[in-house]
Amino acid sequence: MFNGFSNSVRGASHEVKNLVCQDSSAHKVHDKYAICVVADGHGSKKHFRSNVGSQCAVEATVETIERFYENIEEIEANLPTNSKLIIRNIEKQIIAAWNVKIMEHLLHNPITDEEKAPFTEPGEFDKIPPESYYGTTLIAAVIGRDYTFGLQIGDGSLVAIFEDGWTIMPMDYEESNPANITSSMCNANAASMFDCFYNKNKVPLALFASTDGLYTSFGSDVDFLDYHTIICSQLTDLATFEPSILKNLQKRSHFGTEDDISLSCVFNADLLASKIHVINDKVAENRERAKTRKAEMLMNMHKQKHQAAMRRAEELHKKR
Amino acid sequence: MSNENTKGFSGMLDFDDDDPLNATAVSKKSLVIFFLIDTSGSMKGKKMGELNTVMEELIPEIRRVGEADTDVKIAVLTFSTDVRWMYSQPISIEEFEWARLRADGVTSMGEAFKELSIRMSRGQFLNSPSLSFAPVIFLMTDGYPSDDYKAGLKLLQANSWYKFGLKAALGIGNEANDDMLAEFTGSKETVVHAYSGGQLAQMIKIVAVTASQIGSKSMTLSDETDKELQDEDVYAAKQNLLGKQIQELVGNQNEGDTVPFDTGW
């Protein structure tokens, strides 16, 4: 049996400016698989409907994946040999479904004078392609009984936890552009800008998709991964724990980068119940490792200060 | 499906000690300031003494810049015959202590540029997820490089963090070449010059504090103009603002002590 949760919280900076949350999130649980998905609307001037764009993106994703899974036996039989082709097809269909949704929204909600008002230069508004009004990122993943796969356009993170407690970010990290220039669903060549992964070598326990606001509230990748392991250790009583997750996301936005934060998770509840001791041990191990890392960092810094002082003393001695 | 959970921040500050999620700390937005400091033999004496003193005084001032909502980290790279990092990784300004420098050897600035280029990457010094701003890079030197600085600069100029970083330079004494420093920063406005100990203290503080303030500013896309700015433009706007503010502040400075470095040094 699969289970899951998804939450989006408005960024602290957006609260102050009275801006709506640009993020959207969703999860969908089925008997043999489950989907987690988040989207981060760009929110800048020309993407003035990106909150709608992100909502359309998560809806389009869930609907598209469900359509591909209508014949679950066939897709699961083909994934091990044709994963890239299948995932590429899913990505293309998501883009197509998203475009249909946003154009339908535009048709029923024509651009208002208020929305056009910030564009004061002659012809400035007319230069913007309509899909840009709705620009958003998208990160989604599917968990099956013995495989996972995911897809992503733009920034954000995926984390997978396996039955032995191993935790990874399955998407390869590329040296980020410091200007945070991100790929988007609204790019003309969006379908070619997706990254994806497929894993069939280890049995997955839980999958998490999150928008950039969560990742950037951490000081290191290790802390980020440990956080997901802690969440996993509490999922056996999700109903009791879910309010804590929401509260923590709000805290992370408020004291972190002040950005919107979305977190969506799906997990194999039966498998987790039988492996909870492994995850609890992992949490305890991570806690000890974090203490060791901090102690080593401080010791290293003191050592280097001491070495610098010794060098200076040596120099003074030579002068005398 | 949710577009936002509408629950507000009420009660958020009531941290529950038993909440297991509190085990992982929240990191503030962070900024790394790189100081590239010439420690060649020509810096010996008053220049290095004054530099050490002003850097010690500067740390609390930068700490004040960051205390509101930015975690400022410091990395110091010195170059003489060899290049050497003061600490093996950027240190949070809260924990940073200046280790006094000594001067000796030749000016391997090109090697320093190469070393900086290697370390300014996600896999090296810029590995914190909370890194929200392009780095501030502040070069201080009193002379002309003794190695092929252009080769090092070429490598550095290909680094994305350098391209988007805020760059400033300080020439110390008569021998420092402002044109070469402008090659490093990309503009003459972000190059200043100090000819005396008093000026050195003033200039280092002006440049470091102004760059930290601008570097840690979340400049929105319409701050400087009503037009939509691309992200690249935001970084260019920050660099321009840095040059403008530095020149304004330098123009307002007193002469300080008037004994030049190059008199009797």
Image: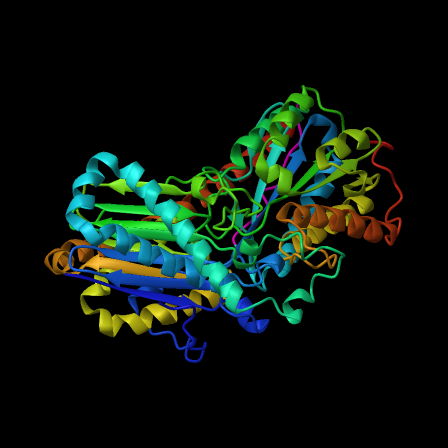
A14, above or below B156, in the image:
below
Give the percent coordinates (x, y) of residue B254: 88, 52
Residue at 18% in and 65% down: A236
Q: Is residue A38 visible?
A: yes
Please give the range of residues in magenta.
B95-105
Give the percent coordinates (x, y) of residue A173: 41, 40
Give the percent coordinates (x, y) of residue A195: 39, 41
**Where's the N terminus of chain B, which quadrant?**
bottom left
> In this view of the protein, which residue sits in the foreground, A228 or A266?
A266
B173 with respect to A256 (left or right):
right
> In this view of the protein, which residue sits in the foreground, B37 or B21?
B21
Give the percent coordinates (x, y) of residue B88: 49, 38
Tell me the quarter of the picture where residue A249 sits: bottom left
Tell me the quarter of the picture where residue B265 sits: top right
B10 with respect to A308 (left or right):
left
Residue at 83% in and 48% down: B247
